[in-house]
Amino acid sequence: MIDKWFKEDLKLIFDQHSIAVFVDESGDAEFLLKCVENLYTIHRTSSELDELYIKYLIEKASPSQKKFIIYTRSN
């Protein structure tokens, strides 16, 4: 059931934005990425600096119809 809620939440985000940041401080929710890995491009980061760099690269590449998830364990 949680995977369904996760997908619904992502859909709401992606209705307005092309990038969603998934903050998972404990690492316990990483399993949720498996249910969307075929739908979205997932980037894993390990720090706020990495997260900003990935956002920069995505936005620099050019606007597209692709949707991106940035998964981070930093808070």
Image (tube, grey):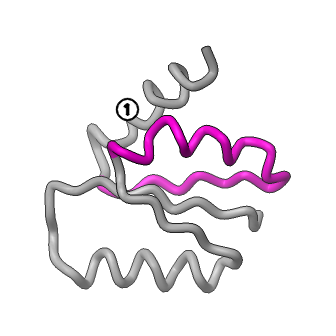
Side (left or right) of 48 relative to 34: right
As drawn, 35 above or below 44: above
Q: Residue at x 74, y 62 (%)?
A: 73
Quadrant placement of the N terminus:
top right
Rendered location of residue 59, percent (x, y): 28, 76
Side (left or right) of 71 relative to 20: right
Rendered location of residue 9, percent (x, y): 47, 30
As drawn, 53 above or below 68: below
Q: Residue at x 42, y 75 (%)?
A: 55
Q: Residue at x 30, y 53 (%)?
A: 67
As drawn, 9 above or below 62: above
Q: Secondary structure at mark 1?
A: helix
Is 37 a magenta residue? yes
Graded by Cα atoms within 10 Å as few (under 14), some (14 to 19) or many (20 or more), the crowding at tag 1 reads: few
Side (left or right) of 55 relative to 25: left
Q: Which residues are magenta?
A: 18-39
Rendered location of residue 50, percent (x, y): 59, 82
Is 30 a magenta residue? yes
Label 1, on which residue? 12
Q: Residue at x 36, y 33 (%)?
A: 11
Name of the residue lying farthest toward the top: 1
Rendered location of residue 12, percent (x, y): 37, 32
Residue 49 image-quadrant placement: bottom right
Nearest the camera: 50 or 33?
Answer: 33
Give the residue type that dot 1 points to.
Answer: Leu
